[in-house]
């Protein structure tokens, strides 16, 4: 679930546009294995009949969830038998998506650092041009999406995030507040995914299950259920790691280090977790050829 820091978690290229699969900060996964045993997680037959209407695979919910899963970063990878560089690039948003995710933040950090460290400007005086450069670049990316008839959703979402962060920083007059919204986004993802574990519906299992045509049958397979729990924990680890590293830098007012770690723990870390997730998914969902053997 950009993501993708989500922190925009970037996720688009030409293949993504053609398939209408934005990928970025939609990074869905993470959790805790204290959700109970697999036996406990598998409903009894009579319970299934009684609660069929409430199950995530019922009716319209299943269709909508499957569509949402298809648009996640995993949607570009899950069914691939072999992972290529092009597949991974598509999953993290493609060249354009990566630029849209990274450049506004990089431009802000570079402009602010140059004005304060090299030009010797006051931090508050340097804040306005740095934010203007960041927001201006995000606007250019959004207009480019619209005029080229690409998928503008990701760019528009990114623009809203950049503007909201810039507005907060301008309101407080503190450059480090340009990164605060990312903290709340990561915390929200981590909490949501942890809840999915606690209610015994690990999010990664739902996403992968629908992507692989498995629905919710994976809950009755001990191996798949445990893999879903584990991968959900991995994704929670991604979001929590961002907070553990970046919040202390915010508290000590180290804007430069905060900006750098934000960039490094955005797309690059997201891509690593995607690859690891794909490896585990392919292990528990073998290809048709291997299954026949």
Image: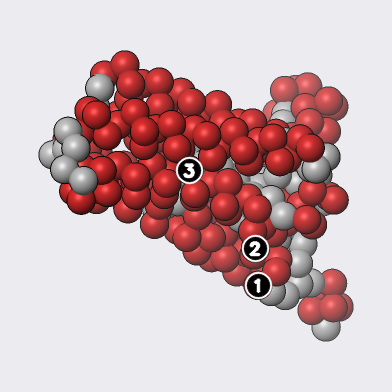
Q: CA distance from mark 3 to mark 2?
A: 19 Å
Examine the rendered structure and indicate whether residue 73 appears above or below residue 198: below
Apparent side of residue 255 relative to residue 137 in the rendered image (left or right): left
Crowd tier of the residue under label 2, counting other residues whose Cα lies within 10 Å: few below 14, some 14–19, many 20 or above: many
Q: Position of residue 166 (x, y in %)?
A: 40, 27
User: Contact (CB < 8 A) between labels 1 and 2?
Assistant: yes
* Nearest to N terminus: mark 3 or mark 1: 1
Q: Earlier in the sequence, mark 3 or mark 2?
A: 2
Quarter holding the C terminus is bottom right
Q: Element at badge 3?
A: helix
Q: Are marks 3 and 2 in contact (CB under 8 Å)?
A: no
Q: CA distance from mark 3 to mark 1?
A: 25 Å
The image quadrant where one finds the N terminus is top right
Residue drawn 18% across and 48% down?
A: 117
The residue furthest front is 119
- For residue 89, the mark is 2
Residue at the extreme left: 252
Where does label 1 land, which residue?
Answer: 85
Q: Which residue is mark 3?
A: 104
C-alpha separation, residue under disc 1 versus residue under disc 2: 6 Å
Above or below for 42 versus 286:
above
Label 2 residue SS:
helix
């Amino acid at each position: 679930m950009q993501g993708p820091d989500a922190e925009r978690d970037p996720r688009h290229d030409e293949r993504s546009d053609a398939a209408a699969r934005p990928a970025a900060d939609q990074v869905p996964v993470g959790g805790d294995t204290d959700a109970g045993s697999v036996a406990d997680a598998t409903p009894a037959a009579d319970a299934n009949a009684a609660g069929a209407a409430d199950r995530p695979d019922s009716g319209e919910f299943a269709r909508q969830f499957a569509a949402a899963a298809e648009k996640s970063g995993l949607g570009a990878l899950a069914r691939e038998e072999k992972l290529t560089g092009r597949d991974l690039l598509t999953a993290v948003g493609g060249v354009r998506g990566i630029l849209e995710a990274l450049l506004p933040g990089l431009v802000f950090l570079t402009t602010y650092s140059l004005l304060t460290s090299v030009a010797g400007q006051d931090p508050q005086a340097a804040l306005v041009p740095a934010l203007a450069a960041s927001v201006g670049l995000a606007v250019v990316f959004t207009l480019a999406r619209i005029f080229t008839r690409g998928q503008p959703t990701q760019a528009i979402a990114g623009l809203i995030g950049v503007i909201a962060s810039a507005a907060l920083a301008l309101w407080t007059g503190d450059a480090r507040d340009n990164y605060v919204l990312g903290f709340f986004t990561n915390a929200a993802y981590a909490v949501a995914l942890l809840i999915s574990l606690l209610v015994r519906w690990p999010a990664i299992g739902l996403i992968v299950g629908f992507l692989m045509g498995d629905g919710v049958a994976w809950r009755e397979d001990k191996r798949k259920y445990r893999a879903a729990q584990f991968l959900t924990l991995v994704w929670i680890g991604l979001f929590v790691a961002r907070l553990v590293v970046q919040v202390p830098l915010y508290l000590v007012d180290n804007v430069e280090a905060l900006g750098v770690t934000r960039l490094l723990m955005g797309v690059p870390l997201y891509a690593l977790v995607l690859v690891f997730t794909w490896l585990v998914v392919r292990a528990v969902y073998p290809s048709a050829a291997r299954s026949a053997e």
